[in-house]
Image (cartoon, rainbow, N blue to C red):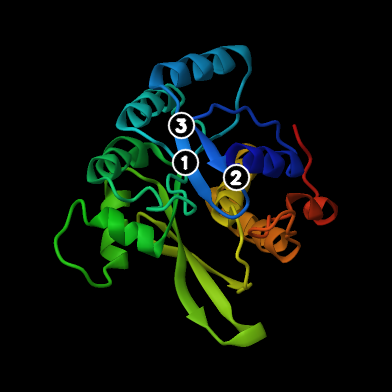
Amino acid sequence: MGIQSDLAAFGALGCHGLSVTTALLVADSARIEDTYDIDADWLVDQARLILEDMPVAAFKVGALTSIEQASAIAEIISDYPDLPFILDPFLSSLPDSGLADDDMLGAIRQILAPQATILLLSQVELARMAETWREGGGDMLIEDVAELTGAGCAYVLVTGTGASGSGAAALRTNTLFGEEGVLATFDWRHLAGPFVGAGGTMSAALAAYMAHGRDPLAAARAAQDFTAGALAHAQRFGMGKLVPNKFFAHSFHGLNPT
């Protein structure tokens, strides 16, 4: 489901997506019932073959299932330091959202996040990751982001950092951070949903816009707009959640693929 969603977003935004699978899901539009992990060596073989065959303009890494996968991907990404790297490592459809394993969280923080151009995560996911380096709870958003940017992560896009209004006028806020602190906040109309793949739609759009050469701030703003439109035009194909419609936006984005 994640790769299918990414490829649709890439195609809608004028990019040709190349996929390497980290897990096979037993899932429908309502839930994930089980996963089958892909061996890290297979992952490396597939990635290396693709990268030797075609030039790439950006990387997006989604949910991972093992520390071995994280290490293998980090090694591959390190060979392409000049390419944008979007990291969106948590899958909200999983029963624990991928947040249960401290060792896995540590691997993401220590070997993948420092290479990321933009790390995308919710405020809840950020707080959970922060438990691997600090004690105590509370709202420490600024300090937690600073830990990541100080370790090398160029930008952190945190979703769900604020809310205002109610009913049809309800707004939600996402915040983009850089090494110097808050760079921009993005408000979007809250939609009831529920949706499958809303966050993945945004991270795929981020990768596509950066592949087209947009800077992180412009890419984040455009990805927010694209995701809001995809959610507003979402469709329910089965008996589960609404699926964002990535193909609504051709007429107004005006991208010129190169």
Please report whichever mark, 2 or 3, sits nearer to the chain's N-terminal start: 3
What distance separates the C-alpha of mark 2 from that of mark 1?
24 Å
Q: Quadrant of the N terminus?
A: top right
Q: Crowdedness of circle 3 by 10 Å Cα count: few (<14), some, many (20+)?
A: few
Q: Crowdedness of circle 2 by 10 Å Cα count: few (<14), some, many (20+)?
A: many
The amino acid at mark 2 is Ala
Residue 11 place in picture, x, y as percent: 74, 39
The amino acid at mark 1 is Asp
Mark 2–mark 1 CB contact (< 8 Å): no
Where residue 34 is drawn, which disc sits there? Answer: 1
**Residue to which mark 2 is pinned:** 204
Residue 163 place in picture, x, y as percent: 49, 79
Residue 88 place in picture, x, y as percent: 47, 46
Viewer-proximal residue, 7 or 52? 7
What distance separates the C-alpha of mark 3 from that of mark 1?
7 Å
123 displayed left or right of 83: left
From the viewer's perspective, is residue 69 above or below residue 127? above
The single residue placed furthest to the right in the displayed view is 251
Picture mark count: 3
Mark 3–mark 1 CB contact (< 8 Å): yes
The single residue placed furthest to the bottom in the displayed view is 166
Please report whichever mark, 2 or 1, sits nearer to the chain's N-terminal start: 1
**Residue to which mark 3 is pinned:** 36
Q: Nearer the viewer, mark 2 or mark 3?
A: 3
172 displayed left or right of 253: left
The amino acid at mark 3 is Tyr
